[in-house]
Image (cartoon, rainbow, N blue to C red):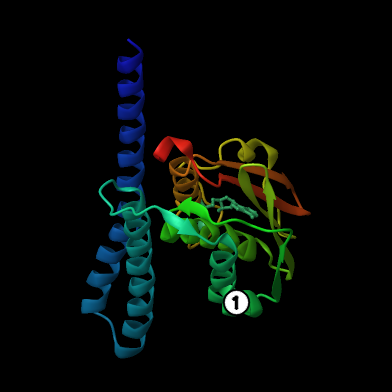
Amino acid sequence: TEELIRKSEKLSVLGELAAGVAHEIRNPLTSLIGFAQLLKESDEEMKDRYIGIMLTELKRINDIVGELMLVAKPQAVHFENSSLKDMLESVVRLLDTQAIIKNVQIKLNTFGEIPPVYCVENQLKQLFINLLKNSIEAMDKGGLIKLTLTRSKGNVIVEMVDQGSGIPRDRLEKLGEPFYTTKEKGTGLGLMVCYKIVKEHFGQIHFESEEGKGTKVQVKLPIYPLSVV
Ligand code: ADP
Ligand code: MG
């Protein structure tokens, strides 16, 4: 019976996800159809505007499909020993331009000797990109994102503290559910991907947040997850 329950849970999650995907993709598609029709009968100036809107909608569909592919099953995963410090440094570099535009500074501090972590490097990078991007996007007034890397016994802990808008209390426990977004151009899939990646690394992710003050995310990863040996 336990197996049955698990299966039916999986199916219902899948059904919800499919319904969500269909809905999220249909909106931009409907708008694309509408604007394609308008294009046929509009002058040059309006054409430019419509094409701009159409490109935005196409990008949205592309983003949704891209993030779904990250959670879709067969993907070559390769576990190896990698340096979290190097990963975080490269992710920070990657997001630097975006941060500077928003007047956000990202500071990385490492405490003590951090051993390499047995992980899929690309996935962990994706995890930290998604989290950092959310922090940057939440900081409309600019400010500081404090990233710290520490070791605690058999785990490595990455903590991220931003000075963004914060997350409402009633939303905090629902983070990771697909398609929840407060952004005009958001997909609401970034955190779902994060939860999946952390789970596949036998780690833990935890959010604390205060509206108007900021958000703290803690990711705890086992240095050597026995379960994958
Ligand atoms: P998206 O970024 O596309 O909206 P995510 O799954 O990455 O989707 O995030 C879902 C929502 O969670 C965001 O729209 C935002 O409302 C909230 N959120 C996530 N991280 C933060 C953060 N650091 N500060 C404020 N809100 C956040
Ligand atoms: Mg996001």
Q: Under tag 1, what secondary structure?
A: helix
- The residue that appears at 54% across and 59% down in the rendered structure is 128
Q: Is residue 77 above or below residue 145?
A: above
Quarter of the N terminus within the rendering? top left
Give the image location of residue 79, x and y in percent. 39, 52
Tell whether 30 sits left or right of 208.
left
The amino acid type, in three-letter code, at marker 1 is Asp
Tell whether 51 sits left or right of 87.
left
Look at the image and tell me whether residue 179 can be seen. no
Quarter of the C terminus within the rendering? top left
Look at the image and tell me whether residue 143 can be seen. yes
Query: Which of 193/220 is in front?
Result: 220
How dense is the environment of label 1, judged by Cα within 10 Å: few (below 14), some, or many (20 and up)?
Answer: some
Q: Is mark 1 within 8 Å of ligand 2?
A: no
Residue that badge 1 annotates: 96
Give the image location of residue 39, x and y in percent. 25, 77
Tell whether 172 sits left or right of 19.
right
Query: Which of 215/64 is in front?
Result: 215
User: Which residue sits furthest right?
Assistant: 213
User: Which residue sits furthest bottom?
Assistant: 44
- The residue that appears at 31% across and 83% down in the rendered structure is 47
Q: Is residue 31 above or below residue 155?
A: below
Q: Is residue 32 above or below residue 192?
A: below
Give the image location of residue 204, x and y in percent. 57, 40
Residue 149 found in image quarter: bottom right
- The residue that appears at 36% across and 68% down in the rendered structure is 59
